[in-house]
Amino acid sequence: GCNPLAETGRSKLQNQRAVLNQQILRAVRMRAGAENLLRATTNNKVREQVLLELSFVNSDLQILKEELEGLNISVEVYQNTEETFSIPMVPLGLKETKEVDFTLPLKDFILEHYSEDSSEYEDEIADLMDLRQACRTPSRDEAGIEMLISYFLQLGYVENRFFPPTRHMGVLFTWYDSFTGVPVCQQNLLLEKASILFNIGALYTQIGTRCNRQTQAGLENAVDAFQRAAGVLTYLKETFTHTPSYDMSPAMLNVLVKMMLAQAQECIFEQIGLPGIRNEFFTLVKMTQEVAKVGEVYMLVNTAMNQEPVKENIPYSWSKLSQIKSDHYKALAHYFIATILCDHELQSGDDEDQQEKALSQLYDYMPEGLMVLTVLKDKVQRKQLGKAHLRKAIVYHEEALRVCGLCKKLRNIDVLQEVLTAAHKRSLLKYAQQETEDDFLSLIQAPDILPKTEHKIETIAPQFSKVKVKDFFHRLGPLTVFSAKQRWTAPRTIHIHHEAGELGFSLKGGSPVQIYCLDPVCSAASMGLKEGDYIVSVGGVDCKWLGVNEVLEKFKSVGEQPIEIEVISCQDTAASMHSKSATYSVGMQKTYSLICLAMEEDKIDQTKKAPLKLPFLSWGTKNRQKAASTLCLPSAVAGSSQIKKKLSPFTLLNTESSLY
């Protein structure tokens, strides 16, 4: 990871985010206490004081939220450092977390569950904690992405080795919401995995934003990075379906995916126009459709950002920036088509049919009384329609400038103002160059332009298999046998004596090998060896990873001398129990507050109506309307834990998972 003390612009923003998260946590705790006191007291004087305190805390929270929004729109820090004349892209900030100490829980589990000396695994535990710490400050390049993916895959091994489905390990993971700053605390490792995935997507957005968009290679890298960011966020949405954090909720992730694909589409348009846009009929037709596509996708992003429940938590400046970009690129589309109509009169040598076909593809309909071929041939109609498009372009430009001026955060981004102003002036100049005598007689309304692109933008799914990861706790043995879900006896020592050159049993299986066809009257059986036992060591040498031939070689190497082996016996896995998991998420309104899954031993017949019970830690609908406490209790939810069939670090990558 990067040096956490480095005074770079990005590290300063992340440090400010961490400080704001702590301030928000303190404020929501104060608000929760005040609301509880307000409900409990009947003293009017106390109620007045509490209401006054609540108004102060709520205003303080609003200020902190605005400061956090300011960090989310601090896009200049993430842009390429070279001088550029492009509208800034929007990156995602990394989720912040608290330090986690795995030492005691993992050492206790190794001693209790694996019956091994836990002190021998201190280096492995330290490596895991160092990797997690480095993931808090990843470098903004492929090395940073690879490190985050390595930790994500390592968590798959850790989950299968140390997190049984029947109980919690006592490791508390705390992650802060990227948009609200509200903490989410769980003992569930899935919260950790989902948050790391979010940060992988966020880091891709920062890489894409950093690319130099004045070069062809830079634009290609930016398109790739935004597509990969969208792919990771899509994977997060589809795999972890009940995340207890607003920034990872399905609705929010859906909006973020749309925004990343829109930014990739914008880079495609810049890539096409990078060599320069020739003032030629068919070139301008192509550019018109491409830029109209960019305007359309940003319009869809803006619409999605203004839907519930995303609207309350998406940064206001992001919503306005998507609206500005939509208007700006729609204006450019109308400017391009106006240039076609005003500058390219049909000449005798031109292909009339091709021009008619190309122009007709731009419109869903033509204004009343106009035909595409007639417009191409008639100089007056051509000019009138061109001026109508210029008027519409100017309207869109002015709307973009107006919205930009209304948003304080966007108003301070100089390059955005410069790009919008330059485009507006260009359209005004083009309009002024046309004759104006017939303006009062022209009632033509410019029709909408049909968007079309030759470069379809799609998400790129994360390719975890490309990152090779070795299990830190490889020495514990093959994961198919030595996992948190399997139960076995403590290792037993068996002294093997050769009887007429025979061991009295055969071996089978892979790693570790199993006892097979045990002779019940042999000396090994009399000492406690059982059919199906796993051999974990031979002559004091660990052999969990050895195959049948290698173990037989060890037996042969001692000749007729007695040899000592250690074996374990698998036990029946205990009946699956419902695991309880609580989500502590102070101050999160409407949804994802405090979520707890309670154990229900007997299933209630679905045809019968369950008696009405008071909810346990549930968020009441009435409380939301009356500014009730943010510390609420969720109603009991019946659930059944499922035993995974495959034991591998990728078990949870291909199945629907819940973070509760």
Image (cartoon, helix red, strand yellow):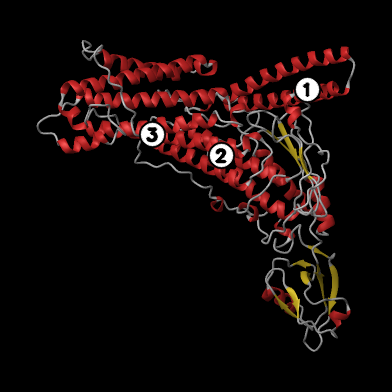
- Identity of the amino acid at label 1? Arg
Q: In this image, 190 relative to 609: left or right?
A: left
Residue under the image location 77 percent in, 38 percent down: 634
* Amino acid type at mark 2: Gly
Residue identifier under label 3: 293
Q: Is residue 323 above or below residue 572?
A: above
Mark 3 or mark 2: name the one nearer the start of the chain.
2
Label 2 Cα crowd, 10 Å radius (few <14 / some 14-19 / many 20+): many
Q: Residue furthest bottom?
A: 500
442 and 74: which is toward the camera: 442
Report how far apart the C-alphas of labels 1 and 2 lie in the structure.
33 Å
Which residue lies under the disc numbered 2? 201
Q: Earlier in the sequence, mark 1 or mark 2?
A: 1
Kind of element beneath mark 3: helix
**Of helix, strand and loop, which one carries label 1?**
helix
Q: Which mark is residue 31?
A: 1
Amino acid on which the number 3 mark rests in the picture: Lys
